[in-house]
Image (cartoon, rainbow, N blue to C red):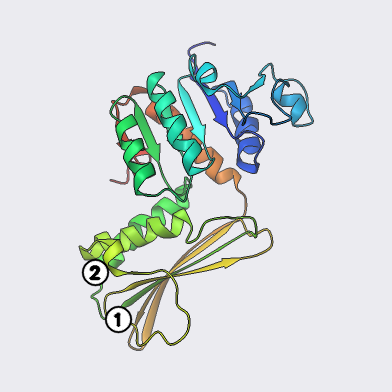
Amino acid sequence: MQDRPGLVVTGVSGRMGRVLAGLIAADPGARLVGAVERAGHPWVGLDLGEAMGGAALGVVVTDDPLEAFATAQGVIDFTSPDATVEFAGLAAQARAVHVIGTTGLEAGHLARIAAAARHAPIVRAGNMSLGVNLLVALTRKVAEALGEDWDVEIVEAHHRMKVDAPSGTALMLGEAAAEGRGVALDAVADRGRDGITGARGAGRIGFASVRGGDIVGEHDVIFAGEGERVVLRHVATDRAIFARGAIRAALWGQDKVPGEYTMLDVLGLV
């Protein structure tokens, strides 16, 4: 059925890319219509299914994102910041929903994404899972309810191959805690401690990162008061939860006006 939205996966040879491709190919509500890899990658020119070691899918891996996006209704992107901003502009030209799970984005990247969102819907989140986005909503509420005499610490753990820290999810949680307190995260964040740091400042939001093994993702938000602690926790054991959330976001965005959205919008939590 051609009324099913056609989706493209960028960075398709990566761990998330492979999971996304398999889930979209099996999804009755979507079609896998494109797969993008960087120029020179050995998968370029091959059928995606065969490149992944399975049956042919009828989708040839390309290094030309403009061509891949031209007939798509959605692009799902878990790549790198520089690649993502390029994809944002091309997806906007195609008027395709751009779902961004890329982390490590800086102010310059975000400005270019915002410019692209004037022309097409963009759903961006540091984490696409239902459970994490519920945790974000809870973190905001708890931070709003508790005063600055409750210290906030965010501890995250991921596999040894993750290249950015704190994780995008940890920063989402930090933003939620700061929003609950009515402050800007950049003004109160402590991203690392080493040596003689002095006593903890009131109202600060601290981050700690663990890297090792094959940890999919673990996040704790610790509210530490005098004589008691409140700990909110999410543990991911299968990265397919992120892929399912991203596909849901791409389908949700099909009838949306241009603009920037989050998974809280997708899940109706705002």
Residue 251 position in % (x across, y down): 44, 28
The N terminus, quarter of image: top right
**Closest to the observer: 139 or 112?**
112
Q: Residues within 10 Å of mark 2 (few under 14, many from 20)?
A: few
The C terminus, quarter of image: top left
Q: Is residue 94 left or right of residue 181?
A: right
Q: Is residue 83 visible?
A: yes
Point out the residue furthest to the top here.
2
Residue 229 position in % (x across, y down): 39, 79
Q: Is residue 92 above or below residue 84?
A: above
Q: Residues within 10 Å of mark 1 (few under 14, many from 20)?
A: few
Residue 184: which quarter of the image? bottom left
Q: Residue at x 23, y 66 (%)?
A: 181
Q: Which mark is residue 201?
A: 1
Q: Is residue 220 above or below residue 228?
A: above
Residue 56: which quarter of the image? top right
Mark before the other along the chain sequence, 1 or 2: 2
Q: Residue at x 47, y 37 (%)?
A: 84
Q: Is residue 101 visible?
A: no
Report which residue position mark 2 lands on.
145
Residue 90 position in % (x across, y down): 43, 24
Tag 1: amino acid: Gly
Q: In what element is the residue under mark 1?
A: loop
